[in-house]
Image (cartoon, rainbow, N blue to C red):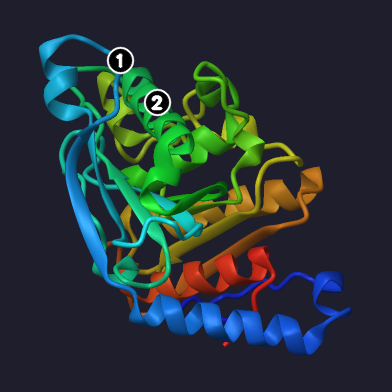
Amino acid sequence: MGAHSIIIILAERSNKKAMLRFPLLSALIILLTNCLTANAQYVTDTDIPFTAKADTYSCERLRLDIHHPSDTSARLPVIVWFHGGGLTGGSKEIPVGLRQKGYVVAAPAYRLIPKVDVEQCIDDAAEAVAWVMRNICSYGGDPGKIVVAGHSAGGYLTSMLGFDKRWLASYGVDADSLKALVPYSGQVITHFSDRAAKGIGALTPYVDEHAPLFHVRNDCAPYIIITGDAETELYGRYEENLYMWRMMKLVGHKETFLYEIGGHGHGPMGDPAFYILKQHIKRILGEPEK
């Protein structure tokens, strides 16, 4: 399959034992849930502070938006979405592709380089996920069904939180309790903004403890890697993630997937990637595919 096609690595379908005993009842419950979700009213709460850090920059920056059903008695899957911007820019956003889709979406901001270093960026992301786990019930979300995702720098943060367990552990959260990690065109070697701070060029490969690739392991949450077209991606991002995919396979991780979205570069790959994200959430939660 060539570089301009969508590369899809499929796992074996497991037996859905929970659906076998009462198939008609299960199907009816899912149908009713989908109908209610489709007709639900959603609201977005903005600029919710999530940090215990007390300095001015943290208090200004460390806030999140939550898109949720107005009926907060629901227990919907939760997507924590980290924005891109090279760790030096960008702001929190609720992607259009995730609005009113049957999820609670939490979109945190984090502090930016050069005002902070890369470790503080990662720590902010960890604090945001921990806050979501503790508080999302109040917004109609299920703390047991949290997926972390993000684009570019947000994809990098997604992978760091999922692979290097110490970041979430510092806030009392087990990274392996997350339902899935879904980086969109994220770096898995040391981030180029971190490399720049070390005097290392954007095209010089470098892997240290700040690289998701450094922390490859076989027992993390399901890992769904999505990139744009190899020929138009940023800084060889597809090949970087292809190597990550191979290492995950070699260490024995059973749920690593890689998608290359043909004809879409670093930015445009985001729109078609939402379909892949949503299908994997259904698969992981045992919902029927559409």
Callouts 1 and 2 close, C-beta under 8 Å = yes
Relative depth, front residue between 282 and 188: 282
Relative depth, front residue between 154 and 227: 154
Task: Determine whether the residue tagged by mark 2 lies in a helix, strand or loop.
Answer: helix
Residue at the disc numbered 2: 127
Q: Quadrant of residue 255?
A: bottom right
| Left or right for 28, reference 272 | right
| Left or right for 158, reference 286 | left
- Earlier-in-chain disc, 1 versus 2: 1
- Seen as rendered, the residue at the extreme top is 55
Q: Residue at x 70, y 48 (%)?
A: 248
Task: Determine whether the residue tagged by mark 1 lies in a helix, strand or loop.
Answer: loop
Q: Residue at x 80, y 86 (%)?
A: 23
Q: Alpha carbon of mark 1 to alpha carbon of mark 2: how far? A: 9 Å
Q: Residue at x 45, y 42 (%)?
A: 158
Position above or below: 69 against 86: below
Q: Is residue 290 visible?
A: yes
Position above or below: 170 against 259: above
Relative depth, front residue between 236 and 135: 135
The crowding category of the residue bearing disc 2, from other C-alpha atoms within 10 Å (few below 14, some 14 to 19, many at least 20), is: many
Q: Is residue 156 visible?
A: no
- Quadrant placement of the C terminus: bottom right
Position above or below: 260 against 163: below
Q: Nearer the viewer, mark 1 or mark 2?
A: 1
| Left or right for 213, reference 220 | left
| Left or right for 95, reference 236 | left
Report the disc number at residue 97: none
The crowding category of the residue bearing disc 1, from other C-alpha atoms within 10 Å (few below 14, some 14 to 19, many at least 20), is: few
Q: Amino acid at mark 1?
A: Ala
Residue at the disc numbered 1: 52
Residue 87, image x and y in percent?
A: 25, 35
